Image (cartoon, grey):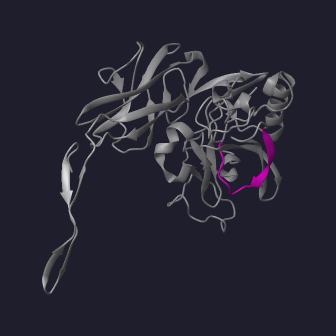
Amino acid sequence: MKGGTKYYVRAYATNRYGVGYGNEVSFTTQPKSMPELTIVMASNITSTTATSVGNITNDGGATITASGVCWSTSRNPSITDSKTTDGTEISEYISPIAGLTPETTFYLRGYAKNSMGTAYGNGISYITSSASTSITDIEGNNYSTVTIGNQVWLQQNLKITKYSNGNLIGTTTPASIDISKESTPKYQWAFNGKESNVPLYDRLYTWFAVNDIRNVCLTGWHVPSNAEWITLTDYLTNNGYGYGGIGNQIAKSMAYTSGWVTDGTAGNIGNDQASNNSSGFSALPSGFGMSGFAFLGSGCYYWSATEETTGLAWRGCYMRYSSTKVYNDYSQEKDGFSVRCLRDF
């Protein structure tokens, strides 16, 4: 159907005596317009890369022919500047951005095109990190770093598919296959098996892959022990990072400033997200894999290198959008959780 056009319609039925028609009614289709979209966030910002999430909310009554994000060092970038091309669906989309310059302010906004023209979403800005705080793994993935107390952490979850010696870490096809009968499964997955999730949410790993002597972390870095995770959370608790500046309600100080499910309770991660991340840890809600995948957008879960007992290992920390606290417990070693690497000393 064409936009802005009046149509007449009536029902019909056929039997052996002929065709019968019902009452005629009419309707007019909505006129076509340009698409509507927003930018949800920019994250995983390093000295040369970033990841953006956009959302097309309305196609304007016409087929989307292109969408993505555009960016520039000037306000209100357009598709004549640098841009990505990310799809034609009415949905949220993830845009990996590369080729940035260190320590520079960039302006970013989403775009979507249909037959009526090109529409732009709301604009945001971000600053790339210093080249001296950015490192690259053997697959070319970039990470920035943050110093918290006496520890130096990667600011992004691990996204590599190889051990530090170049050997591949296994995966499964499909990603949801049952691995419960395997004794020591060493796997990594994109959330729900969708590689498009990796630029923002990175990968999930079984503890057996995390604990392999070939090391999933970059050279000079390691998977933190449970004690090292506790050192981090104790530092934040004891140095005024709790909600309101006191106590152990430190989840907001570690969670990224957007991307979480919203919550109405003050002090929870999902409430007033712009005030999150005072520590710079930049935790994103990457979910988990546990006989399927769950909690993308609402929780994050990090392995430690510490085994509790055969079959169980410690999650160094996990957080939920609806909580003020960071939790520490153990889980099945066959589960898939995120990995943050800590620099060796």
Task: Reply yes or no: does residue 259 show up in magenta.
Answer: no
> At 68% across and 55% down in the image, what residue appears?
335
Q: Position of residue 321 (x, y in %)?
A: 68, 40
Q: How many marks?
A: 0
Front in this rendered view, residue 145 or 293:
293
Q: Position of residue 165 (x, y in %)?
A: 58, 41
Compared with residue 29, is residue 106 higher up or lower down, i.e. above or below?
above
Q: Position of residue 110 (x, y in %)?
A: 40, 29
Left/right placement of residue 70 relative to residue 222 reads left
Asked whether residue 170 appears in the rendered view, the answer is: yes
Q: Quadrant of residue 222?
A: top right
- Quadrant (top left/top right/bottom left/bottom right) for the C terminus: top right
Front in this rendered view, residue 200 or 341:
200
Front in this rendered view, residue 327 or 312:
327
Compared with residue 265, is residue 123 higher up or lower down, i.e. above or below?
above
Looking at the image, which residue sits at the far front? 23
Q: Position of residue 208 (x, y in %)?
A: 69, 53
Left/right placement of residue 186 relative to residue 24 reads right
Task: Reply yes or no: does residue 328 show up in magenta.
Answer: yes
Compared with residue 94, is residue 208 higher up or lower down, i.e. above or below?
below
Left/right placement of residue 257 relative to residue 139 reads right
Asked whether residue 100 appears in the rendered view, the answer is: no
> At 49% across and 26% down in the image, what residue appears?
49
The magenta-colored residue range is: 326-338
Front in this rendered view, residue 331 or 14:
14
> At 33% across and 29% down in the image, what residue appears?
119
Looking at the image, which residue sits at the far left? 18
